[in-house]
Image: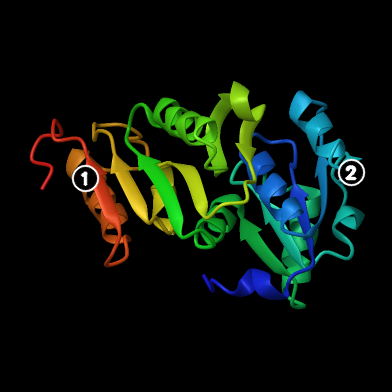
Amino acid sequence: MNKEILNCKKHIHFIGIGGSGMYPLVQILHTKGYYITGSDNNESETLQAVRDMDIPVMMGQRAENIEGADLIVYTAAIMADNPELIAAKEAAKHGVDLMERSELLGLVTSWYDNAICIAGTHGKTTTTSMTTQILFDAGADPSAVIGGKLACIHGSGRCGNSDIMTCEACEFVDTFLKLYPDIAVLLNIDADHLDFFKDLDDIRHSFRLFAEKLPADGTLIINSDIPDYT
């Protein structure tokens, strides 16, 4: 993925904008000055929070909702017969970019000089929340993308004004390999998501690739209780 792809974008449309994984990205991109629109099928507290940012939200998903967008974002949960996704794939033939949410998250992490990406088969949400809370209380003003709600930031994400970002790094379908960590945290490595990974060795291989994404001056924090963690 071209890390500069967002530099020439102005209007980003989110299919399923009320999703918990979409909302933090919407917050960050909206604050950075992008024009955001979105659609969803179900009312939710998160969707109202999106509206409270004066972001246009269309209820129901229709092909015309994507009009004017030069980047369209969807999640892996969007079905192939979704009218907006079908229209977006057609628009992609004519120069409109189409991006899955995890790819966009990876690009956003590349914007921060101190992206703290927390991985592990267990405890990611708790540890990312704790790290965010500590930084928030210390006045470090971090941006955050968390897989759950944190009271101090009133949700699952925020856009801060510092170069620090905390990010929950999920291993499922190798999502975390799309991130650009400056600090990588490995909590544990156990047999999980065996509908995707072949076995524990396959999981360990992906975690090793994640650690190798660190730049030369990056920091790896690893739980020494992980068997044979080297």
Q: Amino acid at mark 1?
A: Arg
User: Is 83 drawn above or below residue 99 in the view shown?
Assistant: above
Q: CA distance from mark 1 to mark 2?
A: 43 Å
User: In the rendered image, which residue does mark 1 sit on?
Assistant: 204
Residue 159 appears left or right of 220: right
User: Is the residue marked by circle 1 packed among few (<14), some (14-19), or many (20+) residues within 10 Å?
Assistant: some
Q: Are marks 1 and 2 in contact (CB under 8 Å)?
A: no
Q: Position of residue 143 (x, y in %)?
A: 57, 45
User: In the rendered image, which residue does mark 2 sit on?
Assistant: 54
Q: Amino acid at mark 2?
A: Asp
Question: Under tag 1, what secondary structure?
Answer: helix
Residue 179 appears left or right of 206: right
Q: Residue at x 45, y 29 (%)?
A: 125
Q: Residue at x 61, y 37 (%)?
A: 157
Q: Residue at x 89, y 53 (%)?
A: 65
Farthest-out residue, front:
139
In this rendering, the label closer to the viewer, 1 or 2: 2
Q: Residue at x 75, y 42 (%)?
A: 17
